[in-house]
Image (spheres, rainbow, N blue to C red):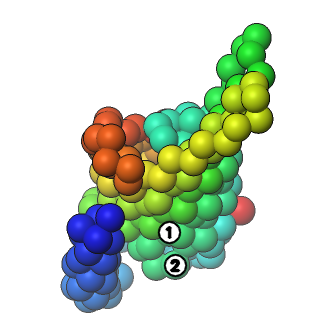
Amino acid sequence: MKKTITLFLALFVILNFSYSQANDSFNSFTSIDSQDEKEYPKNLHQTSGQEKINLSNGFGFPELFYSSIRYQTEQFQLGLYTGTLPVPDTDVSIRTFTGNINYHFGGFSKLAYRRPWFLKFGLSCLRIRDYDYEVDYEFTVNTRIGRDFNITNMFGISIDFGAFIALDGSGTYPSLSLDFFIRI
């Protein structure tokens, strides 16, 4: 557990340093020469105002079938997810609660201020209730890399993959998700 927390804090410090470097690079990007303006939308900064809140639905591990809300600040997103997995013909209930930090770092999109490539770090709680109403909690830490595919300046699809670690020591497992998001 201590190693996991130390790793998570170290990654946060690295991302914070990378963010300051990326912010300097982005500030130089915003002063585009007139000949390069045709490659980026003229309303690039107006579009960024639409990206503060994202709502999404998707499927993934460990989130299961989920809905989320994410808050955007610069190239970071803070997200809260809740998910479930239906288990037909049983009294078993499976729910997840997840908090994620996304750092968008690579490439540019003509439809959004947010960069399309991202790293995702999160903590999940998986709650399993069986037919005897016994409740079991599993906690996991996940790390992923992914990409947003902007279809319009308001709607897109996100795909990511990586690994999640069960904090009870039972192992490391593949992690992935497919997400449909809308900016409001």
- Decide: is 8 above or below 147: below
Q: Nearer the viewer, residue 154 or 110?
A: 154
Query: At numbered mark 2, what does the secondary structure look like: helix, strand or loop?
Result: strand
Numbered circle sitting on residue 77: 1
Which residue is painted at 48% across and 41% down in the image? 62
Residue 157: x and y in percent read: 51, 41
Residue 95: x and y in percent read: 66, 41
Density class for disc 2 (Cα within 10 Å; few <14, some 14-19, many ≥20) is some
C-alpha span from label 1 to label 2: 6 Å
Q: Is residue 48 left or right of residue 103?
A: right
Numbered circle sitting on residue 30: none
- Decide: is 53 above or below 63: below
**Quadrant assignment, res 156:** top right
Residue 19: x and y in percent read: 30, 81
Query: At numbered mark 1, what does the secondary structure look like: helix, strand or loop?
Result: strand
Which residue is painted at 57% across and 36% down in the image? 64
Amino acid type of disc 2? Thr
Q: Is residue 23 visible?
A: yes
**Quadrant assignment, res 21:** bottom left
Q: Is residue 33 left or right of residue 126?
A: left
Check disc 2 and report the residue beneath it.
73
Circles 1, 2 touching at the beta carbon (< 8 Å): yes
Which residue is painted at 27% across and 82% down in the image? 13
Q: Nearer the viewer, residue 67 or 109?
A: 67
**Quadrant assignment, res 16:** bottom left
